[in-house]
Image: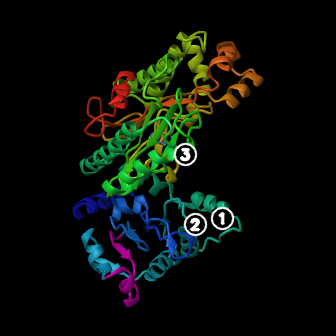
Amino acid sequence: MFDKEIYKARREALKKSMSGGIAVFPGNSEAPENYLSNQYRFRQDSSFLYFFGIDEPDFAAVIDFDSGEEIIFGNDVSIDDIIWMGPQPSVTSKAEKVGISDSRPFKELFKVVGEAVAKGRMVHFLPPYRYYNMLLLSELLGIPCTKNGNDTRKMLAERSSKELTKAVIALRLIKEPCEIEEIDKACDIGYEMHYAAMKAARLGMKEQELVGLMEGITVSKGWGPSFAIILSQNGETLHNHMHHQYLTEGRLFVIDAGAESNTHYASDFTRTLPASGKFTQKQKEIYTIVSDANNLAVEMARPGITYREVHLATARLMLEGLSSVGIVKGDLDEMVEKGVMGLFQPHGLGHNMGLDVHDMEDLGEDLVGYDEDQVRSKQLGLGSLRMARRLKPGHVITDEPGIYFIPALIENWKAAGTNAEFINFDILKKEYYDFGGIRIEDDLLITADGCRVLGSRRLPHTVAEVEKEMAR
Ligand code: GLY
Ligand code: MN
């Protein structure tokens, strides 16, 4: 938890950007895993953490933008709770730690919100993503749930406050020095996770063993993984959570993993490694193209440029590389415009990162990642770009270009004749269907005149660096 002045300043900044009404912020509750009292590890809602800091279940908060009042709602523990959990600080003292002097039992939330509704005041809320909070908002605001939970989510997202959502995004997008310090810590844990896996990898080892090693590091140094670890020799499957294969001579494996610091700030790194510790010639060629694209983004990312422009520049560079090995042919600018790179990188260059590894994705990908004058592309690849904005100092973003050979997608384009004039389908089928995929990801902080690769050390990056570390 940060000093109370940090939370107070964030709430004051929010008040300044809102026109009136009240906002209700439900924190998260425990979520049962396989029976009621066996719960997933508790994770607080990130916007609640950002403004109210309390990292515990069953809290909510209200800010009144007209009177300036701030109220924390939560229940003090009973003697039964103390038997299982030990003594707990009071709700009042928890609220005081984040600079709020008005705390009330949870049921009072219904009274406060009910009065605002009865007076016809605007009640702002953010789009909910947990069903428990959807039920709570539905009851608080008299919005009926539908039989299909997903429809309820969509309906509440439509009824949520765009004014509040935009104001929260504007604040959370620009990271404060205390947040950058936490992200650097998360990056240092991420470094240790990846470095340990790089050192431990041996032919014949099950992928799962490396996942366990990495996950252990995250919980011994921080809160835990910032998302379920992706580690697979089938790196062409972008989010591969199957870890049942054994490391095999001649194959590559992708590790995409990060950590949360104890205060829940995230890191997110990807490295692609040769199972044997040595790249083949063909692997080196494709790896170098991706590594050059990752470095180009580091060179280009600075205030004033859009990340969409950086995405397109890296796409052009990778197409140039793919052209040099005979996979694509033709005019580079035309290939960029027609979206040829989507066949090989069906995702965007990066996303915002902060309290969430895909920061604020629940608030709406376009609202978070696009400026008002930007329209999201429908092309495969560019259409998945989650951060396209004009960069500003304080943005924290990922830089994660990749090249993947996905046989089903290649066959799909071939059958449809998509961009057929640019693509050498014969070489792809003959030489690349069993290649897998390569992604290389670092985390960047936009500074006053450029960017900084986050964390105190950068993970081994070049072919030579990776081979050297794996050989030791
Ligand atoms: N690191 C996983 C992702 O960015 O989707
Ligand atoms: Mn990422």
The foreground one among 107 and 159 is: 107
Q: Is residue 12 shown to the viewer in this render?
A: yes
Q: Is residue 85 magenta?
A: yes
Residue 25: which quarter of the image? bottom left
Instruction: Quickly name the residue at label 1.
Output: 149
**Residue 131 disc label:** 2
Q: Is residue 358 shown to the viewer in this render?
A: no
Disc on the earlier residue, 3 or 2 = 2
Instruction: Quickly name the residue at label 3.
Output: 243
Q: Image point 71% across, 68% down: which residue?
A: 147
Q: Is residue 315 above or below residue 53?
A: above
Question: Comparing marks 3 and 2, which lies closer to the viewer?
Answer: 3
Q: Image point 58% across, 32% down: which residue?
A: 346
Assign a secondary structure to mark 3. loop
The Cα–Cα distance between marks 3 and 1, rounded to whole angstroms, is 31 Å
Mark 2 neighbour density, 10 Å: few (under 14) some (14–19) many (20 or more)? some
The Cα–Cα distance between marks 1 and 2, rounded to whole angstroms, is 7 Å
The foreground one among 348 and 21 is: 348
Residue at mark 2: C-beta within 8 A of ligand 1: no
